[in-house]
Image: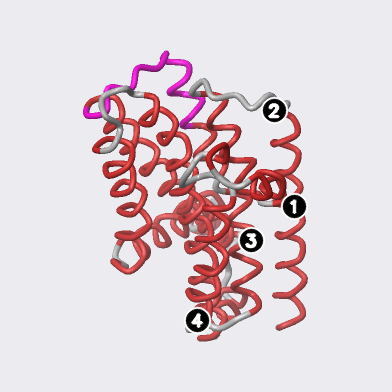
Amino acid sequence: MSSIVQGSTHSPWQSYLQEAKCEALRMLREPAFCLPVIGFPVLFYLLFGVLLDKGEGKAAQYLLATYGAFGVIGAGLFGFGVSIAVDREKGLLRLKRALPVPPGALLLAKMVMAMSFAAIISLVLAVIAATVAGVALEPSQWIRLFVIDVLGVLPFCAIGLYVGSLVGGNAAPALLNMLYLPMAFLSGLWLPLTILPDILSTIAPLWPAYHLGQLALKVVGFDMGQPVWVHVLVLAGITVLFFVLAQRRLSAAE
């Protein structure tokens, strides 16, 4: 009898892995999510970083960093924001809490999913940059840029989680787009802040996307002179703040 009980035990790690696998497959099978999230930064980079670069390579190198940040921000915001809003609206979050799964399995699964999409975006842009655009970076630079992209998705997962805790599934995409697109432009991810009005450069540090973009730009050789720890501290603070706010909101809604 004891051997049967022992053989039926299920490791919590298996539950986490299964949850992460299911969440990744769910989003991969959702064209409305995966195609824009992966396709938009790639398309924009091909258009502005490759076709309009005029063979100089500077724009391609600059936009590799900023469009990488632009892409992973979308993966975090929409991967969390829309799916959480839909799950909450349909009562799936309550169902998940009633199931015998480890605490936090759903959020961890969504984090892994968002980081996986961030990794895909970063790798695809890197391949295009290295082959088509002729961007030449040191191996350590490629690795650091990849790490920044993958970890940089987390603050925007937290923001997306909070937005998803506030609105329903129909309103979430519109609200997130109202945040995503202006934030990307005002943070200098589409165009360098140096060619935009001075007022935009002044307010740019108010946006978390700016700090992620600056970390990526430092890696590829466009350093604005601000310490790395400032950007890291801001992004870490944003992550903690919005995860706490979202957790309180979701707990109060139950």
Placement of 19 over or under 50, stated as above or below: below
| Marks 3/1: CA–CA distance | 10 Å
Q: Which residue is mark 1?
A: 240
Q: Earlier in the sequence, mark 3 or mark 4?
A: 3
Residue 67 highlighted magenta (yes or no): no
Q: Are marks 2 and 4 in contact (CB under 8 Å)?
A: no
- For the image, the number of numbered tags is 4
Q: Residue at x 55, y 77 (%)?
A: 85
For mark 3, give the secondary structure: helix
- Check disc 3 and give the amino acid type: Ile
Q: Earlier in the sequence, mark 3 or mark 1?
A: 3
Q: Residue at x 60, y 32 (%)?
A: 215
- Check disc 1 and give the amino acid type: Val
Q: Position of residue 238 (x, y in %)?
A: 72, 51
For mark 1, give the secondary structure: helix
Q: Which residue is mark 3?
A: 159
Placement of 42 over or under 62, stated as above or below: below
Q: Which residue is mark 2?
A: 228
